[in-house]
Every structure is written in C-alpha cells, then in structure tokens.
Image (tube, rainbow, N blue to C red):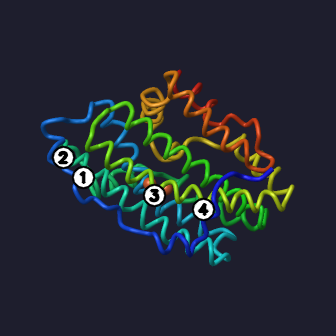
C-alpha cells in the first residue's frame, strides 16, 4: 500500500529551510488579549518539546540513520527549524510574563535523570541489533510525532481563537508539514521494502509509542494537553485522522495510537 504523502527529499527541504518568519507578528497584542491559562499550559509543553529536538537528534545520530547522507541533511534542517519554533513559542510565553527559553530549558534538562543518560546507548545498541529496520522505525516514529504535533497546533488554534497566536501557529504548521512529508515518505519507502522492518516497527509502536514529549514531560502536563486539545468530539476526529495516516503506512494499519492515547490520558 502506498503512502499518500508527497515525496520530500532533503535537497528540496534545503531550498526551503528558513528561520520561522515572525514578520508582522504582534507579540505585544498578548498583553491586552492573553491566551487562556489552559492554552498557556499547553504552550509550555510545546515550548519544552520543540527545544528538546536537539536531544532527540543526539539519539538518532547514534543509530544507522547517521550513515544515510539524505537523512543527516534532513535532520540538520529539521533541528534548525524546530529550534526556531521553540524560540517563537518562547516569545509568546515571555509576553505573558512566563519563564521561557534558556531558563525553562535548563530547568527541564536538570529534571532528566538516568533514562535520559542511557538513551543514546540504547539507541546505539538497538540499531546494531536491528540494522536498517531501526532506521525505518525511526522514520516512522518521526512521521507519527510530526503528525501529532501538527494536529496539536491545529487544535490549539481552534481552542484559542486568537488571531495573533493563530497566525503564528499556522506558520509553524506549514514547516511541520514539510517535516511530515520527509519522514512519511522515508518511512513508507523503507517499510514497503522490508517485511522485517514492518513487523519490528509495528511491534515497537504498539508496545512503546507515547505522544511526543511523554518521555521528558511530567504526565499531568500531557494529560492536560490531551484533555484540552483532543478529548472533545472535534479533537477525537483529529486524532482519528492522524491514525488514518498511520494506517496507510505499509504494515501499520489498525494501531489506533492517537485514539488510544486520547482515551488513556484524557481519563488521567
Ligand atoms: Fe516544531
Ligand atoms: Fe516538526
């Protein structure tokens, strides 16, 4: 089964890569029209996870993915764009008098314990054992996370009805769309050519997948994000749509990852 995502190679992305364009975004407007407290709590989560991209990159480079120059080029651009997403959200938080940027990121990294320290080791060993299938898994995992992130931004826009926030998040979503295209096309191609990769990826997603950020953010924060963005009827529809994207990847139909996660965290 073919995926329905456009082919996005690293060189195409290289020509489009850009620091997020903030021209015309009036951060001062948040003083007279602030984002709701529930929305700010979601933005704190997103801020920390966007800034964590470089640490996910650290783990990825421990794997066979680093042998593929197309992937390493993509990861370079991806990491750059995600950094500027973090910076943009930081400016929204700062406009609300919230801690942001280095101050929040340092505090978050200080929270991480041994699991974070051994993570590169586990990725390296996993990749040694699984070989190329591990890269297929990573590309799939990346696609799922990017789909989820984009869905979360879309839901936050709908929840807040804030013109400035909406404009900013739409700009971020456009870049996330290109990340999706790369990860999903790499995942589709790699899964299609290997039944072993399909089986391993399916098993790993089913057993270990959690929404992006779950490994580094406190569970009540993920539960809040899930409740605020995905627990109502529209939110569940969006979660189901992400699951349908995953269903279209070779060997991955019927996992219901997002819907399962909404059921689990929204009840937490
Ligand atoms: Fe991002
Ligand atoms: Fe992204």
Q: CA distance from mark 4 to mark 2?
A: 33 Å
Label pair 1/3, CB-CB below 8 angstroms? no
State the residue position of label 4.
182
In the drawing, what numbered circle is on residue 95? 2
Q: Counting residues from the N terminus, which is met first, the one under dot 4 or under dot 3?
A: 3
Residue 184 vs residue 199: left or right? left
Q: CA distance from mark 4 to mark 3?
A: 11 Å
State the residue position of label 3.
175
Q: Secondary structure at mark 3?
A: helix
Q: Secondary structure at mark 4?
A: helix
* Residue 64, placed above or below residue 31: below
Circle 4 or circle 1, nearest the eye: 4
Ligand 2 within 8 A of label 3's CB? yes
State the residue position of label 1.
91
Q: Label 4: few (<14), some or many (≥20) within 10 Å?
A: many
Q: CA distance from mark 1 to mark 3?
A: 18 Å
Q: Please state the horizontal and vertical placement of residue 249, each as a whole percent of the image.
A: 74, 49
Q: Please state the horizontal and vertical placement of residue 171, each as a whole percent of the image.
A: 37, 53
Q: Counting residues from the N terminus, which is met first, the one under dot 4 or under dot 2?
A: 2
Q: Please state the horizontal and vertical placement of residue 208, each as a whole percent of the image.
A: 67, 43
Q: Counting residues from the N terminus, which is met first, the one under dot 4 or under dot 1?
A: 1
Circle 1 or circle 3, nearest the eye: 3
């Amino acid at each position: 089964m073919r995926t329905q995502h456009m082919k996005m190679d690293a060189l195409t992305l290289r020509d489009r890569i850009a620091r997020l364009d903030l021209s015309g975004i009036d951060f001062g407007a948040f003083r007279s029209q602030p984002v709701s407290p529930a929305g700010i709590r979601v933005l704190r989560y997103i801020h920390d996870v966007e800034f964590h991209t470089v640490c996910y990159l650290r783990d990825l480079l421990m794997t066979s993915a680093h042998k593929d120059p197309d992937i390493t080029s993509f990861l370079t651009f991806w990491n750059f764009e995600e950094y500027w997403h973090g910076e943009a959200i930081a400016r929204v938080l700062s406009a609300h008098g919230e801690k942001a940027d280095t101050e929040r990121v340092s505090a978050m990294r200080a929270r991480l314990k041994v699991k974070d320290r051994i993570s590169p080791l586990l990725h390296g060993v996993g990749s040694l054992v699984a070989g190329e299938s591990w890269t297929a898994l990573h590309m799939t995992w990346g696609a799922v996370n990017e789909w989820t992130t984009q869905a979360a931004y879309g839901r936050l826009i709908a929840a807040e009805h804030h013109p400035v926030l909406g404009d900013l998040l739409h700009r971020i979503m456009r870049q996330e769309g290109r990340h999706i295209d790369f990860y999903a096309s790499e995942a589709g191609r790699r899964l299609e050519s290997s039944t072993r990769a399909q089986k391993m990826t399916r098993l790993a997603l089913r057993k270990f997948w959690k929404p992006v950020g779950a490994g580094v953010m406190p569970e009540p924060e993920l539960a809040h994000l899930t409740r605020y963005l995905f627990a109502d009827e529209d939110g569940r529809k969006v979660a189901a749509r992400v699951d349908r994207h995953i269903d279209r990847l070779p060997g991955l139909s019927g996992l219901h990852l997002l819907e399962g996660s909404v059921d689990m965290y929204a009840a937490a």
